[in-house]
Image (cartoon, helix red, strand yellow):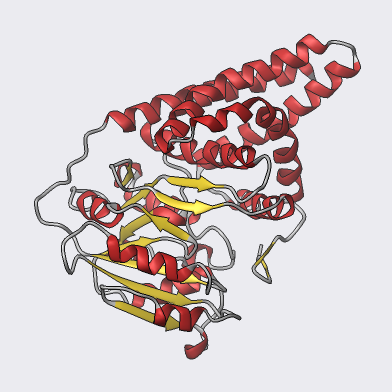
Amino acid sequence: MIVIAFLFIGLYSTLMILFTFGFIRLQMEKRTGGSITRIPVSVIIPARNEAESLPALLEALSHQECEDGLFEVIVADDYSEDDTLNAAMRANHNYPLTVVSLKDHELPAGKKSAISFGIKHAKNPVILLTDADCIPEMKWISSYSRIFSEKGCHMSAGLIRYYSLWKSPAAIETLDFYGMVASSAGAAGIGIPFMCNAANLAFLRKSFEDIKGFSHHSEISSGDDVFLLHQFVRMFGKDSIRWNLMSGSIVNTTGTGGVLSFFRQRLRWASKGKYYTNKTAVGVSLIVLLTNLFVAAGVIIALFQGRAMISILILLIKMLADIPLMVMITKRFGQVDHLAWFVPATIMYPVYTSITGLMSLFLRPGWKGRRIRL
């Protein structure tokens, strides 16, 4: 078991080195857009039970640094059980705002349905997605408008800064999330995009229609971002995906607020893995899951055998593989102080990712009062 742990640590370390190189490559990329003309954007916000957070996002969009008339906003209410609809209608804004409801049209429930319905009401060629509990930086919309003026761009994704609601230790949840964010960008930087997040995701409306939207994975509740990315890669090629690391393009969001919520969220994310058909996504997921399983097992076995140094060595190799990417992403977000929790996060990570990875094979996670369809 210890030997297998070292073998998988080697594979994992190679993967992290490649992702680190990809992230560096993206940061060095000078992106100015393909033309002076800016492409109009339709911002789609699917919302379910977001009466408290949605007004802040809608007001924040009023402060975007971009030309007048460059964007519109469509809020698509997903059968909210609170005052989300009225909150959206009352929100302060200085841009065209459309509020639509799945319930009013007796449409199927779910985030994918809400996004699709919002897109039907969109007037502009670029669709930009975010979640109702997010706040984007001030050049968010203009940065995507510039990226889609580049020839051959069908989809683009950006970075997400995380503010944990945990009282302590918040940094562990944040570092866990940043591992996924940085790896997603790093993979795209070496030409193998396989993961993204719908909190900061854009694509051409026509391209979305060409792939028939979410129809290829409509039976699965989650995956409105990852499966869509895989379909874009399949249809238009990996070069059609551009990563947005332009200044002012980051989206800010908050964490889960507790250990139980954290596990439910990670279980929901992990549950998508068994439906992956994208070879890169399958390969990376297997390497990460098996590495964590064998690292956890190897460390425990070594400790029981009185070989503590082997346990320390296994964890040390993993930390050395992870630290360059984590330094870069936390520096980018101005949260380098979170690295003070890097060691305990590294120790805990193989344990809870192994648990959620295995549990996702059997359990149906919940989300806002619903069971995810698997």
Q: Where residue 371 appears, x then y in whole percent?
A: 69, 68
Q: Where residue 350 appears, x then y in whole percent?
A: 71, 32
Q: Where residue 83 appears, x then y in whole percent?
A: 54, 81
Of the 4 image quadrants, the one containing the N terminus is top right
Say above or below: 63 vs 259: below
Q: Residue at x 49, y 53 (%)?
A: 253
Say above or below: 278 vs 107: above
Choose between 57 and 39: the one closer to the eye.
57
Horizontally, residue 114 falls left or right of residue 274, namely left
Q: Where residue 210 appears, x then y in whole percent?
A: 33, 64
Q: Is residue 205 visible to us here?
A: no
Q: Is residue 194 visible to us here?
A: yes
Question: In the picture, residue 211 is in which quadrant?
Answer: bottom left
Horizontally, residue 345 falls left or right of residue 222, namely right
Q: Residue at x 55, y 25 (%)?
A: 322
Say above or below: 181 vs 203: above
Choose between 181 and 289: the one closer to the eye.
181
Question: In the picture, residue 245 is in which quadrant?
Answer: top left
Q: Residue furthest front?
A: 167
Q: Residue at x 73, y 20 (%)?
A: 4
Choose between 374 and 30: the one closer to the eye.
30
Q: Residue at x 49, y 55 (%)?
A: 227
